[in-house]
């Protein structure tokens, strides 16, 4: 046992193979990434589009595998240099760091676009290092200079003259020269965590840059979220970029094979065999994750961390505990949804009423399934279109969180057109919506989930759904920012002073509000939270982000490199 205050060198010394269960692809080293990644059900088509020409938008909720697909495309292009393509992988996860510019000054777009260009130049340098005998233009700044400018921009201390030359035109010129000098025909820029900032103006500025860098030789690809992404007025999905769905629909043998392969790869080398005698149990957990590998990996990690709690002497999984474990995927998606209260405070009424509407949807499916045989029960719903702006916004939030998945539209003759959605299977299995009052078993749940649906789902309307949730359209209001001194809502958008305490009102920054949150907001255990606070000065999310080298985290007992990276990843994810 490690003594209090003793530094731990690496988590692999504490819990062997825990790095197998890292959920975020960008934190896995290349060699490990290749061995741990399973083949996505639509991977062949997605790879062709990500690795080829044209602008693409890879869309899906948090944790559905966008980063994995982006990194696969990047590594594939690096490995096959006969394709004459220069791949650049850049992560814009911390774009919200630039959001304070938008509430403090008039030239925010100028600074933000400079940051975007410098981030791409930084990743361009990394890509070039992977090529042999590569001719680099003299005008391309060195990594040290790029890093210095990025740091200054993020600290709101950059000099205008320092960045003036590094604009979109400069980026285009450098890329064209690189391709010409090295006899390459195309540059593919893979932009991960793109347009994830909750500042609409930032997102619009990003899409203006995305559209501007697209050319015959430069093909930008961006990973985005459904429901919350704001495109610029000049950007049109379909015309300016093709949209690609990264979210694997949780149905069919191909989906089951994908998730089983993922489980096998993650448990390989651990000495724990959970597949051979428990394949249906693992497939049930895969369905309960609702097509989101991050949620599925969280469940697998729980089994890996405490195999004695889940696996008996015969190598079989405890059915009761597996049923309980299946809640983890839906809990993760609900946590993402609830986080919108902090990330989009002006939409607080939408988020709160959205929870009620979602529960009403679950109740409608429960009533629909009441008394039906297992094969006739529904896991989906349809709602007559159009649904109206308020419901459209809420459905967007629910898709962003991974709680509902749109699966097309249905025309029912005189009855009109309906939008069709699948609902998070983890909610259906834990909220007494499937199987009903029968004795619940994994086999019974799989019977319902695998059964052909034959249009077996409740059909709703906007008015019937609002009535079921006991909500009216008047309940949807946009909230004004709070006074930073007394938390009283502003009396009107143009107010200069608080109507309650008289304090001069400051511009509201989402980023500043998020980084001030206590670390208990992150998905870490209370035990881990206490250990961090007892052995360091880390209290808020800002403290973790400031510890970018992870030196403070690594000085805490029982926190090694893998776990420190995981905690930093949670903090970065929270503000992205």
Image (cartoon, rainbow, N blue to C red):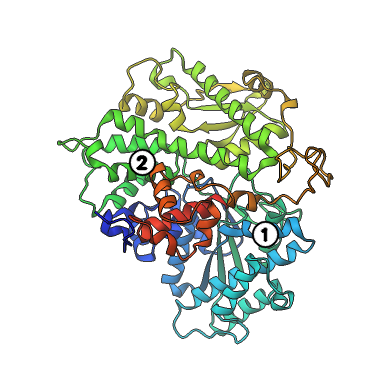
Q: Secondary structure at mark 2?
A: helix
Nearer to the camera, 458 or 316 = 316
Q: Kindly identify the residue that appears in the image at 58 percent across and 60 percent down.
A: 92
Residue 337: mark in rendering = none
Q: Is residue 19 above or below residue 398?
A: below
Tell me the residue at 46%/36% (across/down). 331
Give residue 382's position: percent from left, percent from top: 58, 27
The secondary structure type at the circle numbered 1 is helix
Q: Is 63 on the left-hand or right-hand side of 387?
A: left
In the picture, measured across the screen, residue 270 lies left or right of residue 337, that is: left
Please state the total of marks drawn on the protein image: 2
Residue identifier under label 1:
206
Q: Position of residue 395 (x, y in %)?
A: 62, 35
Q: Visible in this render: residue 84?
A: no
Determine whether 419 is above or below 81 in the image: above
Residue 233, image x and y in percent?
A: 76, 53
Q: Which mark is residue 299?
A: 2
Dot 2 crowding, Cα within 10 Å, few <14, some 14–19, many 20+:
many
Give the residue displayed 45% in from the left and 74% down from the top. Answer: 81
């Amino acid at each position: 046992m490690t003594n209090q205050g003793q530094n731990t060198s690496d988590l692999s010394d504490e819990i062997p193979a825990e790095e197998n269960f890292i959920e975020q692809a960008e934190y896995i080293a290349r060699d490990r990434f290749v061995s741990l990644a399973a083949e996505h059900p639509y991977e062949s088509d997605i790879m062709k589009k990500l690795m080829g020409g044209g602008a693409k938008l890879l869309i899906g909720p948090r944790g559905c595998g966008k980063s994995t697909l982006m990194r696969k495309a990047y590594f594939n292009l690096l490995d096959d240099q006969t394709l004459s393509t220069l791949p650049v992988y850049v992560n814009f996860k911390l774009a919200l760091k630039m959001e304070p510019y938008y509430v403090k000054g008039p030239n925010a777009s100028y600074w933000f676009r400079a940051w975007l260009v410098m981030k791409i130049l930084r990743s361009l340098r990394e890509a070039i290092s992977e090529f042999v005998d590569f001719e680099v233009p003299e005008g391309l700044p060195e990594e040290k200079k790029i890093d210095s400018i990025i740091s200054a921009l993020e600290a709101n201390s950059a000099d205008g003259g320092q960045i003036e030359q590094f604009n979109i035109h400069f980026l285009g010129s450098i890329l064209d020269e690189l391709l010409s000098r090295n006899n390459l025909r195309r540059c593919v820029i893979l932009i991960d965590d793109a347009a994830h900032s909750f500042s609409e103006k930032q997102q619009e500025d990003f899409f203006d840059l995305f559209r501007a860098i697209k050319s015959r030789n430069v093909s930008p690809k961006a990973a985005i979220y459904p429901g919350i992404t704001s495109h610029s007025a000049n950007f049109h999905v379909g015309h300016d970029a093709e949209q690609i769905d990264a979210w694997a629909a949780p149905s069919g043998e191909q989906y089951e094979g994908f998730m089983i392969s993922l489980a096998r790869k993650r448990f390989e080398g651990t000495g724990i065999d959970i597949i051979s005698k428990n394949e249906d149990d693992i497939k049930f957990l895969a369905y309960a994750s609702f097509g989101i590998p991050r949620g599925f990996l969280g469940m697998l990690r729980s089994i890996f961390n405490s195999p004695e709690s889940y696996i008996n002497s015969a190598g079989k999984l405890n059915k009761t505990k597996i049923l309980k474990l299946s809640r983890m995927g839906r809990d993760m998606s609900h946590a993402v949804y609830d986080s919108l209260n902090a990330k989009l405070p002006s939409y607080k009424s939408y988020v709160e009423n959205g929870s009620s509407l979602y529960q009403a949807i679950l109740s409608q499916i429960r009533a629909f399934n009441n008394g039906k045989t297992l094969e006739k029960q529904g896991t989906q719903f349809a709602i007559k279109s159009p649904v109206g702006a308020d419901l459209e916004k809420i459905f967007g939030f629910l898709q962003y969180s991974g709680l509902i998945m749109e699966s097309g539209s249905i025309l029912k003759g005189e009855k009109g057109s309906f939008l069709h959605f699948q609902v998070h299977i983890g909610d259906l299995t834990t909220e007494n919506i499937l199987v009903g009052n029968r004795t619940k078993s994994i086999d019974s749940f799989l019977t319902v989930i695998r059964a052909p649906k034959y249009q077996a789902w409740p059909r709703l309307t906007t008015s019937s759904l609002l009535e079921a949730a006991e909500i009216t359209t008047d309940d949807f209001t946009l909230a004004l920012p709070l006074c930073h001194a007394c938390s009283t809502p502003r009396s009107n958008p143009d107010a200069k002073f608080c109507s309650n305490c008289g304090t001069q009102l400051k511009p509201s920054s989402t980023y500043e509000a998020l980084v001030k949150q206590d670390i208990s907001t992150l998905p870490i255990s209370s035990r881990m939270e206490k250990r961090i606070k007892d052995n360091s000065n880390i209290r808020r999310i800002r403290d973790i982000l400031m510890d970018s080298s992870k030196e403070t985290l690594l000085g805490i007992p029982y926190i090694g490199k893998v776990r420190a990276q995981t905690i930093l990843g949670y903090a970065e994810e929270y503000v992205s």
